[in-house]
């Protein structure tokens, strides 16, 4: 759960009838976000006006929570994968996190679930990589302004 996943999760959790479960690894670097988000606090900075209030609201309404348990994917109709795609010293993308998360999701998801990948990933990796476990993926390219909340109109 980071700069892309948190705002999108909070936006969807604010839609009537939607219940959103975010999955965050309990790593030393990011595991603390689980408790922060579940208590209604915003763990990220940046230019997302209104995000802190939105997180607090959807947690209070019980439509958003975070866990480290990928089994939550087994009941999901829609799964949004947001992972960082760091680069190595030569500037080549490292897809380790994407492959790990895609594998976990692929093992847990129900047939017919919609999977959306939001990351800086070359479309060809979807065809050749681990994500093809999910089947039927079509790549779309889109550009966002700096504020995700302002870019997504609901």
Image (tube, rainbow, N blue to C red):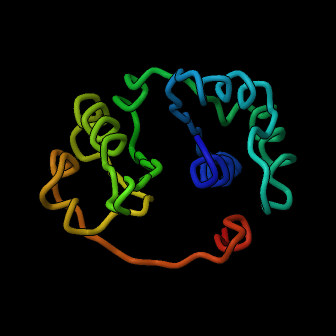
Kindly identify the residue that appears in the image at 23 percent across and 30 percent down.
107
For the C terminus, which image quadrant? bottom right
In this view, which residue lies farthest toward the front?
Answer: 89
Query: What residue is shown at x 64% (from left), y 46% (from top)?
Result: 6
What residue do we see at 84% from left, 46% from top? 52
Q: Is residue 145 above or below residue 30?
A: below
Q: Report which quarter residue 62 is drawn in.
A: top right
Between 64 and 127, the one nearer to me in the picture: 127
Counting every numbered tag in the picture gives 0
Tell me where residue 93 sits by quadrant.
bottom left
- Looking at the image, residue 83 sits to the left or right of residue 6; the answer is left
Give residue 145's quadrant in the image: bottom right
Residue 54 lies left or right of residue 135; in this view the side is: right
What is the x, y in percent for residue 94? 33, 50
Q: Position of residue 104 (x, y in %)?
A: 30, 31
Relative placement, left or right, of 61 versus 63 is right
Quadrant location of the N terminus?
top right
- In the rendered image, the vertical position of residue 40 relative to residue 91, given as above or below: above
Percent of width and height locating residue 15: 66, 53
Residue 133's place in the image compared with 4, above or below, is: above
Q: Is residue 10 above or below residue 100?
A: below
In the image shown, does 85 or 141 lie closer to the viewer?
Answer: 85
């Amino acid at each position: 759960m980071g700069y892309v996943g948190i705002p999108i999760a909070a936006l969807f959790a604010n839609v009537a009838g939607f219940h959103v479960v975010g999955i965050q690894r309990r790593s030393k670097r990011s595991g603390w976000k689980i408790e922060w988000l579940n208590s209604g606090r915003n763990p990220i900075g940046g230019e997302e006006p209104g995000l802190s209030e939105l997180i607090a609201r959807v947690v209070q309404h019980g439509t958003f929570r975070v866990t480290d348990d990928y089994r939550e994917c087994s009941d999901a109709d829609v799964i949004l994968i947001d992972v960082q795609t760091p680069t190595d010293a030569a500037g080549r993308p490292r897809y380790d996190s994407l492959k790990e998360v895609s594998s976990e999701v692929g093992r847990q998801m129900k047939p017919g679930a919609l999977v959306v990948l939001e990351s800086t990933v070359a479309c060809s990796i979807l065809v050749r990589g681990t994500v093809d476990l999910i089947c039927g993926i079509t790549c779309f390219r889109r550009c966002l302004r700096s504020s995700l909340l302002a870019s997504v109109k609901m």
